[in-house]
Amino acid sequence: MRSLWRTIGRGTLRDIALVCLADALVGASFGAIAVSGGLPPWAPVAMSLLVFAGGAQFAALGVVLAGGDPLAAVASGLVLNARLLPFGFAVADALGGRLATRLPGAHLITDEVVAFVLARHGTRARRVTFWTCGLALFASWNLAVAGGALAGGAVGDVAALGLDAAFPAVLLALALPALRERVTRRAALYGTAAALAATPFLPAGLPVLLSLGGLAVPGSRPAAGRRGPGARPE
């Protein structure tokens, strides 16, 4: 435990705990919404264990509860989760080189885990952060979904509790420190503008992918040879 504290740091462990708490609130709302919408309690629990992707799960659940085809629900989840492919490349070193660790590690890749890992430098620190955050989020999310599913219809109008706002609030809090750099702010603004403009016309998930185009706008990437604060040597 003491080694864990030294490697990750007390502040990072505290932030991971707060993210787990926020995700647990969202997970409980997912389980309750699914059961109150008519699904059996085992359905949201099984989806959370096998998929483990909050945004994709909510997208698929929305399609199913609206009477959509199961294939359409799967397609919406796949489109929304397509962003995890470049995320996987960004944190590949944290998963280790063995297949026995890379396969379960790939299952734990989420927006929050990637945000924590990218803020760490050094292979050991990134690897310990990845597994600590990933396993903690997996446990808290699935336990919360099971609790929400058991509560079921007793919760009533889950949206009235405002739990759906916890997930985007967590992501915003994780992104804010990176916006201190002008280049990052510029890319974020371009990407946000592109996503907002495309939202009325594209299916859910595609505007998020389109926002990556903000990185291609001139002036949105660091110049060659330029290093930001805390950059690692080549």
Image (spheres, helix red, strand yellow):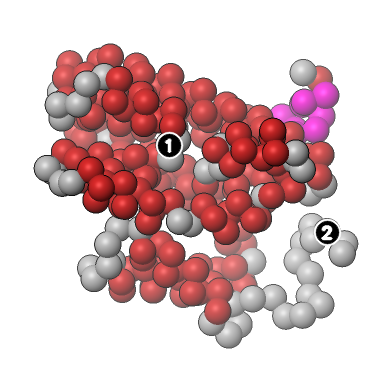
How far from the left and from the top, in percent, is residue 56?
Answer: 36, 45
Q: Earlier in the sequence, mark 1 or mark 2?
A: 1
The three-letter amino acid code for the residue at tag 1 is Val
Residue at x 55%, y 79% (from the top left corner): 216
Our reading of the magenta stretch's main secondary structure is helix
Please say whether residue 9 is visible from this viewpoint.
yes
Q: The residue tagged with tag 1: helix, strand or loop? A: loop
Q: Quadrant of residue 63?
A: top left
Is residue 22 located in the magenta-colored stretch of the structure? no
> Crowdedness of circle 2 by 10 Å Cα count: few (<14), some, many (20+)?
few
| Number of the label disc, if any, that sits on residue 51 | 1
Question: Is residue 45 positioned above or below 120 on the image?
Answer: above
How far from the left and from the top, in percent, is residue 120?
Answer: 73, 46
Q: Which is more toward the observer, 21 or 91?
A: 91
> Crowdedness of circle 1 by 10 Å Cα count: few (<14), some, many (20+)?
some
Circle 2 residue: 232
Give the magenta part as a residue range. Answer: 3-11
